[in-house]
């Protein structure tokens, strides 16, 4: 029991701080690596490694064509369109601001479940929505957020990617993706990564790229995203789901933005204003109202920038 207790503590630490640090890792990775190519190669590599893990853990049966197609659809929503767009937006939007905007995601999930799947949320959720919208307004409506030629484009990209994640999260429980979680996530990464890599070539993402221009910082950030951001953090999250309640496992929703803001300020020289801090507190309060109103926590994408 004592050993399991420490494993649970270590798993919480991993989901809190590893996923919180992926925002900065993504930013460093795309400094000298093609934006979409970096993500495509990252997910393909992680997908292969997770497939190998799936051979030793969980159900070893061969996935059906339907399960593969379902995983592929979720992989495209989560990774190609979701994470791919958010990482692209980080060329113009600071990592701390990106993380705080992503904290807005439970509101989009609630709206999709209500408008598309007619699952009407309770009054507490509407209070959370109003609070979150107020926090989002505080965050975006300040010069520190809206500086630079691509700021508006970046924010729209983040909102689009977040919408893809939210739609994917509402679809996931309704699709059969097999019992083996490692294999299901592996198939999502393989398909999502392949499509993102293909898009990177179609978009001329690799034009002018040379291996010798890749900095050590970008290379190490990419390795971190594969080994820690995808595989280790996802494994830790699945371990928590088997040992604690889902609402406790998903408390990373509140901690990840804080970690991202602190790391952005300390390691990337990002300016964190008092208004940004206030906006973060308000938005996270809104997220708390939304999640506690639904009675169940949403499961985040393990390989995203969250």
Image (tube, rainbow, N blue to C red):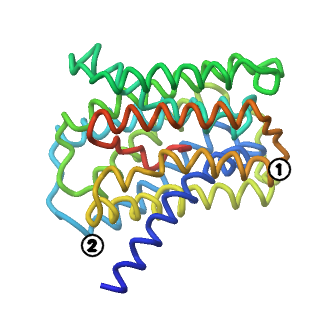
Please tell me in which quadrant of the rendered image residue 220 appears.
bottom right
In this rendered view, identify the residue nearer to me: 281 or 17. 281
Kindly report the distance in space between the C-alpha atoms of the residues bearing marks 2 and 1.
Answer: 38 Å
Which residue is tagged 1?
Answer: 213
Please tell me in which quadrant of the rendered image residue 249 appears.
bottom left
Q: Is residue 79 left or right of residue 205?
A: left
In this rendered view, identify the residue nearer to me: 89 or 70. 89
Residue count near mark 1 (Cα–Cα under 10 Å), binned few <14, some 14–19, many ≥20: few
The residue tagged with tag 1: helix, strand or loop? helix
The residue tagged with tag 2: helix, strand or loop? loop
Residue at image coords 15%, 45%: 64
Residue at image coords 74%, 30%: 275
Q: Are marks 2 and 1 in contact (CB under 8 Å)?
A: no
Query: Can residue 277 be seen in this snapshot?
Result: yes
Which residue is tagged 2?
Answer: 56
Question: Among all residues in the image, which is located at the extreme top?
Answer: 115
- Where residue 2 sits: x, y (%)? 35, 86
Query: Can residue 200 be seen in this snapshot?
Result: no
Q: Nearer the viewer, mark 2 or mark 1?
A: 2
Quadrant of the image containing the N terminus = bottom left
Which numbered disc flags the more N-terminal residue, 2 or 1?
A: 2
- Where residue 182 sits: x, y (%)? 31, 58
Q: Is residue 58 left or right of residue 286?
A: left
Q: Is residue 107 left or right of residue 62?
A: right
């Amino acid at each position: 029991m004592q050993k399991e207790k420490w494993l649970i503590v270590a798993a919480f630490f991993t989901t809190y701080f590893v996923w919180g640090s992926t925002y900065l890792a993504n930013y460093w990775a795309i400094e000298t690596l093609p934006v979409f190519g970096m993500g495509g190669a990252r997910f393909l590599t992680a997908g292969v490694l997770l497939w190998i893990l799936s051979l030793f853990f969980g159900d070893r049966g061969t996935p059906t064509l339907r399960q593969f197609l379902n995983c592929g659809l979720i992989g495209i929503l989560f990774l190609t369109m979701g994470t791919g767009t958010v990482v692209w937006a980080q060329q113009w939007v600071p990592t701390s601001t990106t993380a705080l905007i992503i904290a807005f995601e439970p509101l989009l999930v609630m709206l999709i479940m209500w408008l598309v799947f007619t699952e009407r949320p309770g009054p507490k959720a509407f209070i959370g929505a109003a609070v979150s919208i107020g926090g989002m307004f505080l965050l975006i409506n300040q010069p520190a957020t809206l500086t630079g030629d691509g700021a508006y484009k970046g924010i729209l990209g983040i909102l689009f990617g977040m919408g893809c994640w939210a739609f994917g999260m509402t679809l996931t429980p309704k699709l059969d993706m097999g019992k083996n979680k490692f294999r299901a996530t592996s198939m999502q990464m393989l398909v999502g990564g392949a499509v993102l890599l293909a898009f990177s070539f179609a978009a001329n993402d690799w034009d002018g790229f040379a291996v010798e221009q890749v900095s050590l910082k970008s290379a190490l950030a990419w390795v971190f995203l594969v080994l820690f951001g995808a595989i280790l953090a996802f494994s830790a999250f699945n371990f928590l789901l088997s040992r604690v309640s889902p609402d406790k496992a998903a408390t990373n929703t509140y901690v990840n933005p804080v970690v991202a803001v602190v790391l952005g300020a300390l390691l990337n020289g990002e300016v964190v204003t008092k208004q940004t801090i206030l906006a973060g507190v308000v938005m996270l309060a809104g997220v708390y109202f939304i999640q506690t109103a639904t009675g169940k926590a949403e499961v985040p994408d393990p390989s995203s920038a969250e």
